[in-house]
Amino acid sequence: MKKIFFLPATDPTDTSYGDPQAEYKAIHRKNSDVECRLVEFDRLVWYNSEIRQMTMAKIGDYCQGDWTEIILAGFSKSGCGAINLALDNPGRFAAVVVFDAP
């Protein structure tokens, strides 16, 4: 089963773009072959090396060493974080998805 990990782009209390957890649960209900997870932080983060290490640890705790099905997804600055994580860890992820508003 593919596991999509969405990286946060806003403060965890910011709902101006909707409720990420509800959206990911809706995706999972529509497609049982995909599991969606939100990487969570207690504050707004920028994807510097420390945060990238924390992100890898959070994903690693969940996937327990099996990275073959992991897809990273990020919007805006978290998209930049996803790209940097992939560059830091070549070949580790099944895919990286980056998107932004026009």
Image (tube, helix red, strand yellow):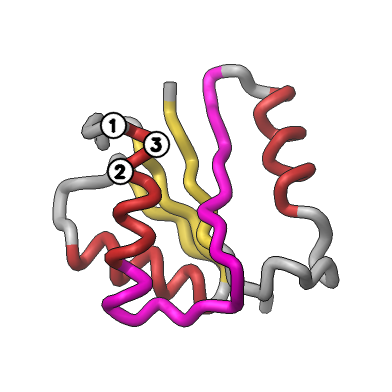
In the image, 101 versus 34, the foreground residue is 34
Residue 64: numbered disc: 1
Q: Which residues are magenta?
A: 33-52
- Residues at marks 1 and 3 touching, judged by CB atoms closer than 8 Å: yes
Which SS class for mark 2? helix
Does residue 50 belong to the magenta stretch?
yes
Alpha carbon distance from label 1 to label 3: 6 Å
Q: Residue at x 31, y 55 (%)?
A: 56
Name of the residue lying farthest toward the front: 42
To which residue does mark 2 refer?
Answer: 60
- Residues at marks 2 and 1 touching, judged by CB atoms closer than 8 Å: yes
- Residues at marks 2 and 3 touching, judged by CB atoms closer than 8 Å: yes
Which SS class for mark 3? helix
Q: Residues within 10 Å of mark 3 (few under 14, many from 20)?
A: few
Residue 62: numbered disc: 3
Locate the C terminus and report the quarter of the image it occupies.
Answer: bottom right
Does residue 34 belong to the magenta stretch?
yes
Q: Residue at x 27, y 45 (%)?
A: 93
Q: Position of residue 100 (x, y in %)?
A: 60, 72
